[in-house]
Amino acid sequence: MYEHFFQCPYCWEEISMLLDSSVSKQIYVEDCEVCCNPIELIPEFSENELISFQANDLEQ
């Protein structure tokens, strides 16, 4: 597992989430631990290293 820190697209607080680095491309939804809004997470790994990360609000 890989811990990644980023800003919530709703409340702008810095939060962290554990990402599974064993899967190279992923898209899933997790709730912000501060404001509880759903965040679409799109991490991409190469050789267990994070190469791309997006955190999108679902109201777009």
Image (cartoon, rainbow, N blue to C red):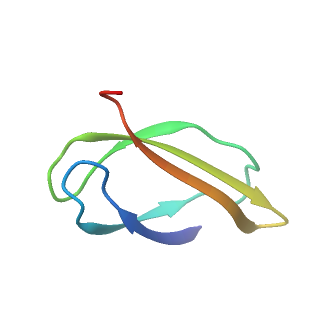
Q: Residue at x 18, y 55 (%)?
A: 11
Residue 22 screen position, x and y as percent? 73, 56
Quadrant housing the C terminus? top left
Would you say 11 lies left or right of 14 here? left
Residue 10 vs residue 29, the one in the foreground: 10
Q: Residue at x 30, y 56 (%)?
A: 8
Residue 3 screen position, x and y as percent? 50, 72
Residue 20 vs residue 38, the one in the foreground: 38
Would you say 41 lies left or right of 30 here? right
Would you say 23 lies left or right of 43 here? right
Instruction: Work out which residue is located at the far front of the displayed protein and give it.
Output: 60
Q: Quadrant of residue 31?
A: top left
Q: Quadrant of residue 14?
A: bottom left
Q: Quadrant of residue 26?
A: top right
Residue 7 screen position, x and y as percent? 34, 63
Q: How many marks?
A: 0
Instruction: Work out which residue is located at the far left of the displayed protein and give it.
Output: 35
Q: Is residue 11 above or below residue 4?
A: above
Residue 44 vs residue 2, the one in the foreground: 44
Instruction: Work out which residue is located at the far right of the displayed protein and give it.
Output: 47
Q: Residue at x 31, y 67 (%)?
A: 15
Q: Residue at x 55, y 59 (%)?
A: 19
Quadrant housing the N terminus? bottom right
Q: Is residue 4 above or below residue 41?
A: below
Residue 5 vs residue 23, the one in the foreground: 5
Residue 47 screen position, x and y as percent? 85, 66
